[in-house]
Image (cartoon, rainbow, N blue to C red):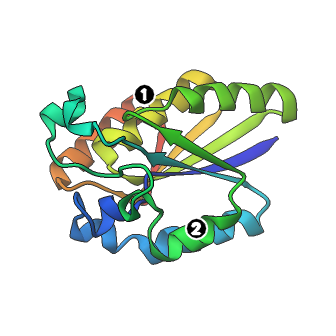
């Protein structure tokens, strides 16, 4: 029986960079504390990093959101602040090229088969209505019997209404929402 914390995309460009927003900045200390507690309690800790290449503006996403961000090997791609330091010893780092990660699906299934049953996954990070919800759905698909918990007070969106709607959708998909 294993428990897992996943921090989604808490990177410079989503906090104080190209797509940064004030609510995201306020999460840093809280997410860092949660990461430290998870390590102390014996949980596995993983994180994802949104990743784009120099040709981002030519991609489908780049055409719809023409703001270069999280470009590989730039400061905006790096993890932010105290959270970044707390994640230095994370068990798994996942580079992803779109909102949700196919690698997350593969690694969750492989880990569950080879290292014991994952019984609970807690997810936090940014952006709630894009990457958080996408990866939460993937986690639920990978491990349908695991308890999936979304820590609402450790998630944020640039749009509070979309944040709340995303939480509602995840709750309707039998994920537990805490900290609301």
Which of the marked residues, 1 or 2, is nearer the chain's N terminus? 2
Question: Where is the C terminus found, in terms of image quarters?
Answer: bottom left
Q: Is residue 113 above or below residue 43?
A: above
x, y percentage for residue 107? 67, 31
Residue 12 in the figure: left or right of residue 140: left
Residue 144 appears anywhere in the view = no
x, y percentage for residue 86? 61, 71
Q: Is residue 68 above or below residue 59?
A: below
Question: Where is the N terminus found, in terms of image quarters?
Answer: top right
Find the residue positioned furthest to the front.
Answer: 54
Tell me which residue sits at (58%, 67%) in the image: 34
Q: Nearer the viewer, residue 32 or 12?
A: 12
x, y percentage for residue 42? 79, 60
Q: Which mark is residue 173?
A: 1
Local SS, label 1: loop
**Mark pair 1, 2: CA separation:** 24 Å
Residue 158 in the figure: left or right of residue 53: left
Q: Quadrant of residue 80?
A: bottom left
Residue 110 appears anywhere in the view = yes
Of circles 1 and 2, the one toward us is 2
Tell me which residue sits at (70%, 25%) in the image: 109
Q: Nearer the viewer, residue 81 or 23?
A: 81
x, y percentage for residue 172? 37, 30
Residue carrying label 2: 34
Residue 138 in the figure: left or right of residue 21: right
Determine crowd level at label 2: few under 14, some 14-19, many 20+ residues with C-alpha closer than 10 A. some
Q: Nearer the viewer, residue 50 or 176?
A: 50
Q: Nearer the viewer, residue 74 or 15?
A: 74
Local SS, label 2: helix
Q: Which mark is residue 53?
A: none
Tell me which residue sits at (61%, 64%) in the image: 87
């Amino acid at each position: 029986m294993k428990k897992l914390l996943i921090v989604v995309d808490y990177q410079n460009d989503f906090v104080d960079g190209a797509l940064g927003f004030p609510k995201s900045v306020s999460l840093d200390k809280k997410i860092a504390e949660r990461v430290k507690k998870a390590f102390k309690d014996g949980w596995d800790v993983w994180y994802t990093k949104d990743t784009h290449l120099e040709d981002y503006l030519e991609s489908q996403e780049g055409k719809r959101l023409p703001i270069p961000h999280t470009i590989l090997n730039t400061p905006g791609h790096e993890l932010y602040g105290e959270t970044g330091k707390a994640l230095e010893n994370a068990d798994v780092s996942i580079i992803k090229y779109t909102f949700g990660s196919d690698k997350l699906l593969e690694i969750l299934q492989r880990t569950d088969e080879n290292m014991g049953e994952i019984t609970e996954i807690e997810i936090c990070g940014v952006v709630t209505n894009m990457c958080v919800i996408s990866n939460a759905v993937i986690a639920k698909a990978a491990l349908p019997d695991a308890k999936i918990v979304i820590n609402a007070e450790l998630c944020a969106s640039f749009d509070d209404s979309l944040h709340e709607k995303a939480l509602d959708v995840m709750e309707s998909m039998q994920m537990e929402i805490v900290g609301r």
